[in-house]
Image (cartoon, rainbow, N blue to C red):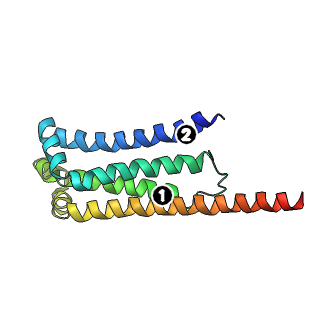
Amino acid sequence: MPTFKRMLIPIVFGFAGMLTLTGIYFGIVSLAESPSHAIELFLEDRWIVTPIILGFGIQVTLYVIMKKRLFIPVPDVGPSGALTGAGGGFSATAMVACRAHHVTDVLPLLGLTAAATFLAEYRLAFMVVGLGTTILGIIVMLTILYRERRKVLHMLLSTAEVA
């Protein structure tokens, strides 16, 4: 596979992950309130929402590199997939939880008033945990990639010494 394509694939997936998470945030808040209110809330929480979105994009990029074995043959991606899903899901939930109380008018019919209130009450804590999970996922994936890179280099050096 050409180098350009190997670089382009994970970048495209990373941006797609960021756009998806951003779309979920703006979509849910826009439905609960309005698009202009969604922008206002994003600007208000940008100090935590932006790192969550960027971190998720980085995490998706690294996961694709590992899963598709684009640069280093990684035999096992370990908990990377679970951490990517958990980080993204937790972050998305946390980002929209701050505005979940706006839809509580219909939630009693569904029996979800307590859940919406709980999420709204602890939204910042959820966002911090979501960001932490994303950072942990990035660290785990970088560690796996570094370990596999060292194995490949060691194998190449061993082969060169024999020849």
The residue at 46%/58% (across/down) is 138
Above/below status of 39 relative to 146:
above
Which residue is the site of mark 1?
82
Question: Which comes before the other along the chain, label 2 or label 1?
Answer: 2
Secondary element at image label 2: helix
Q: In the figure, residue 161 lies in which quadrant? A: bottom right
**Type of the residue with mark 1:** Ala
Disc sitting over residue 7 in the figure: 2
Q: Residues within 10 Å of mark 1 (few under 14, many from 20)?
A: few
> Mark 2 against mark 1, which lies toward the viewer?
2
The residue at 23%/41% (across/down) is 26
Picture quarter with the C terminus: bottom right
Above/below status of 14 relative to 45:
above
For the residue pair 83 and 104, the one nearer the viewer reads as 83
In the orientation shown, which residue stands out farthest toward the right?
163
Classify residue 156 as left or right of residue 146.
right
**Type of the residue with mark 2:** Met
